């Protein structure tokens, strides 16, 4: 099985989450290609797609939105999940956070099976007046690898699920059994190509 993980990242935090997702997929013997959403031209050869976007001022990253719009027809024919990177606290690990409106719209456009919000990251050395002011009080890294791994297991339909579905009203159910069949044909050491920025 081959899964494409794409992301729109403003300052690298969401790119890092995408890389964590790619690593979790590799651990499940899935081939994962992790790349910026703006660089993808075709979805040919992929069995599923995961799309992530940073959330800033209640807006889902424009590269993630554009990716979903540009590939909506192809995505509708594949299992698709979305994720967001946002809260600068531990709230994402304490319960399911509803996606922002732009992510909800993207879910409808591509018929996504679920969505998950993960904690974000804000460097204390970030540039920009607004971000710099925020960093004085909220700098830190709330990305949780355990949370990421649990979500990946859930979407692959593997044991150890958290019970958290991607979105209330959306089951976040596993991909149609390609995962089980793919486990037989996937190489023992899958190769992931990551272009994380």
Image (spheres, helix red, strand yellow):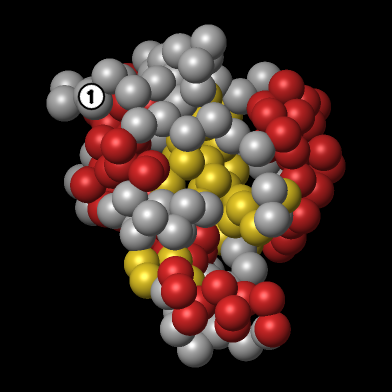
Outermost residue, left direction?
A: 160
Residue 100 lies in quadrant: top right
Check the image and report above or below for 51 versus 134.
above
Residue 169 x/y as whole percent: 53, 10
Residue 187 lies in quadrant: top left
In which quadrant is the C terminus drawn?
bottom right
Residue 80 lies in quadrant: top right
**Residue at point 45%, 26% (across, down):** 166
Residue 119 placement, left or right of 84: left
Q: Secondary structure at mark 1?
A: loop
Q: Nearer the viewer, residue 9 or 89?
A: 89
**Residue at point 59%, 34% (across, down):** 99
Question: Does residue 26 appear anywhere in the picture?
Answer: no
Name the residue tied to disc 1.
Answer: 161
Check the image and report above or below for 31 versus 94.
below
Residue 117 placement, left or right of 80: left
**Residue at point 54%, 46% (across, down):** 84
Residue 4 x/y as whole percent: 53, 45
Q: Nearer the viewer, residue 30 or 90?
A: 90
Residue 121 placement, left or right of 109: left
Q: Nearer the viewer, residue 57 or 196?
A: 57
Question: Does residue 42 appear anywhere in the picture?
Answer: yes
Residue 174 x/y as whole percent: 39, 19
In which quadrant is the N terminus drawn?
top left
Q: How many marks overall? A: 1
**Neighbour tally class for label 1: few under 14, some 14-19, many 20 plus, Cα within 10 Å:** some
**Residue at point 60%, 56% (across, down):** 54
Q: Nearer the viewer, residue 73 or 16?
A: 16
Check the image and report above or below for 5 versus 163.
below
Residue 82 x/y as whole percent: 56, 36
Check the image and report above or below for 108 versus 44.
above
């Amino acid at each position: 099985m081959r899964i494409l993980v794409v992301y729109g990242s403003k300052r690298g935090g969401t790119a890092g989450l995408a890389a964590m997702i790619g690593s979790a997929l590799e651990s499940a013997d899935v081939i994962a290609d992790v790349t910026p959403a703006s660089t993808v031209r075709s979805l040919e050869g992929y069995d599923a797609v995961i799309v992530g976007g940073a959330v800033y001022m209640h807006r889902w990253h424009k590269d993630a939105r554009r990716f979903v719009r540009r590939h909506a027809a192809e995505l509708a024919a594949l299992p698709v999940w979305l994720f967001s990177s946002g809260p600068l606290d531990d709230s994402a690990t304490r319960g399911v956070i509803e996606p922002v409106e732009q992510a909800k719209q993207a879910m409808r456009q591509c018929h996504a099976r679920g969505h998950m919000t993960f904690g974000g990251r804000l460097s204390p050395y970030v540039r920009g007046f607004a971000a710099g002011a925020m960093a004085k009080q909220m700098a830190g890294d709330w990305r949780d690898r355990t949370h990421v791994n649990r979500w990946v297991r859930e979407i692959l339909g593997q044991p150890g699920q958290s019970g958290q579905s991607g979105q209330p009203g959306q089951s976040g159910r596993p991909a149609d059994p390609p995962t089980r069949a793919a486990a037989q044909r996937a190489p023992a050491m899958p190769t992931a190509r990551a272009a994380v920025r």
